[in-house]
């Protein structure tokens, strides 16, 4: 009996162990203003568009973090209203000369609880229809939960399952509160075998509030392989700056201690503002996670 849990643990990792390595970057900069070609051709296979949120009536907003851009509503009343230029831009990440094959939207937890209480997760609700319309318009693959406030398991599981019905995968970007994430993952994936898991990726913040995070500990607690994130060189919190050379060292060290699902960066805005190289940061991921 003593060995059984670890055997089950290994089996639970097995399907994801076969998956291709994840090479991710968060798109903090307005996607209409960032360097699309560099983002597409530097080795990243996963883009996470930041930040998305839902309003009390179930509309979906794309919040601007870029000077000169403003927040916009991208889906409302069950219809995509974010404009064709934005839709074409997001879709273009996966077409033509590109290494990208997965696009996620990264969202906060505002209004999740109240909307899951009323009107609930049904397929006829504005929220469900808005997510379906946005998925279609942008060609999305997953919704990333960047909850740093609510941490309520029940409503979040309900929300995740609703998104699963709309055709999305669900992922997380934790920095703390490992219990919440463990319960969320196990309840979201309950009864779903291997490749069909709904919550299929953990992007672990290993900077700022998560600077002390160890992917190996999180892997054991969450029973899932981890994609650690580091923050590129930044003048906002320079103490968390990571050069490409340092990123390579960190990823290699973590990868040698526990087999990672890949690696990733927070964020493109700083790469451009600080005149850093997408090629160097992407190249590190190609080298460590070929
Ligand atoms: C695709 O982009 C890469 C990197 O910029 C470039 O080296 C390559 O020539 C491009 N391929 C085509 C077919 O344009
Ligand atoms: C992602 C992020 O927080 N980037 C910050 C980097 O630093 C500049 C200012 O120095 C901020 O404007 C950015 O928001």
Image (cartoon, rainbow, N blue to C red):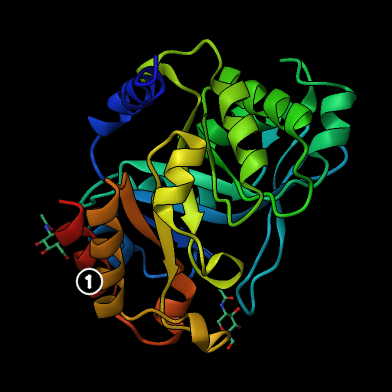
Q: Which of these two is toward me, 131 or 276?
A: 276
Which quadrant holds residue 132? top right
The residue sitting at 50% across, 61% down in the picture is: 213
Q: Which of these two is toward me, 9 or 252?
A: 9
Q: Which of these two is toward me, 220 or 103?
A: 220
* Vertical order, 130 against 36 (above or below): above
Which quadrant holds residue 261? top left
Relative to 165, 242 lies left or right: left
Secondary structure of the residue carrying tag 1 is: helix
Q: Where does the image place residue 85, in percent across and percent down from the top left?
A: 51, 53
* Vertical order, 273 against 130 (above or below): below
* Vertical order, 107 against 223 (above or below): below
Q: Where does the image place residue 126, in percent across and percent down from the top left?
A: 78, 27
| Ligand 2 shown in quarter | bottom right
Q: Which residue is mark 1?
A: 279
The residue positioned farthest toward the front in the image shown: 2
Q: Where does the image place residue 89, in percent across and percent down from the top left?
A: 44, 53
User: In the rendered image, which quarter contains the N terminus?
Assistant: top left
The residue positioned farthest toward the top in the image shown: 191
Which quadrant holds residue 228? bottom left
* Residue 83 visible in the snapshot: no
Question: Mark 1, residues whose alpha carbon is within 10 Å: few (<14), some, or many (≥20)?
Answer: some
Q: Which of these two is toward me, 8 or 284?
A: 8
Q: Where does the image place residue 34, in percent across and percent down from the top left?
A: 44, 69
* Residue 212 visible in the snapshot: yes
The residue sitting at 64% across, 71% down in the picture is: 69
The residue sitting at 44% across, 40% down in the picture is: 220
């Amino acid at each position: 009996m003593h060995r059984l849990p670890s055997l089950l643990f290994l089996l639970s990792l097995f399907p994801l162990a076969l998956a291709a390595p994840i090479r991710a970057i968060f798109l903090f900069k307005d996607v209409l203003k960032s360097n699309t070609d560099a983002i597409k051709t530097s080795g990243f296979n996963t883009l996470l568009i930041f930040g998305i949120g839902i309003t009390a009536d179930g509309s979906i907003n794309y919040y601007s973090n870029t000077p000169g851009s403003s927040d916009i509503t991208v889906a409302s009343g069950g219809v995509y209203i974010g404009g064709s230029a934005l839709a074409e831009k997001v879709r273009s990440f996966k077409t033509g000369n590109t290494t990208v094959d997965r696009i996620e939207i990264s969202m906060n937890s505002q209004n999740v609880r109240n909307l899951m209480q009323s009107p609930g997760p049904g397929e006829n609700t504005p929220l469900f229809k808005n997510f379906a319309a946005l998925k279609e318009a942008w060609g999305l693959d997953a919704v990333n939960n960047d909850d740093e406030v609510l941490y309520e398991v029940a409503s979040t599981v309900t929300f995740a399952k609703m998104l699963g019905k709309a055709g999305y995968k669900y992922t997380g970007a934790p920095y703390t509160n490992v219990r919440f994430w463990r319960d969320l993952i196990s309840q979201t994936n309950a009864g779903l075998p291997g490749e069909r898991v709904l919550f299929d990726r953990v992007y672990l913040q290993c900077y700022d509030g998560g600077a002390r995070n160890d992917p190996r500990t999180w892997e054991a607690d969450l029973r899932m392989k981890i994609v650690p994130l580091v923050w590129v060189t930044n003048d906002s919190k320079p103490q968390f700056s990571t050069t490409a050379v340092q990123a390579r060292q960190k990823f290699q060290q973590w990868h040698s201690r526990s087999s990672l699902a890949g690696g990733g960066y927070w964020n493109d805005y700083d790469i451009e503002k600080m005149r850093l190289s997408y090629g160097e940061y992407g190249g590190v991921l190609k080298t460590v996670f070929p």
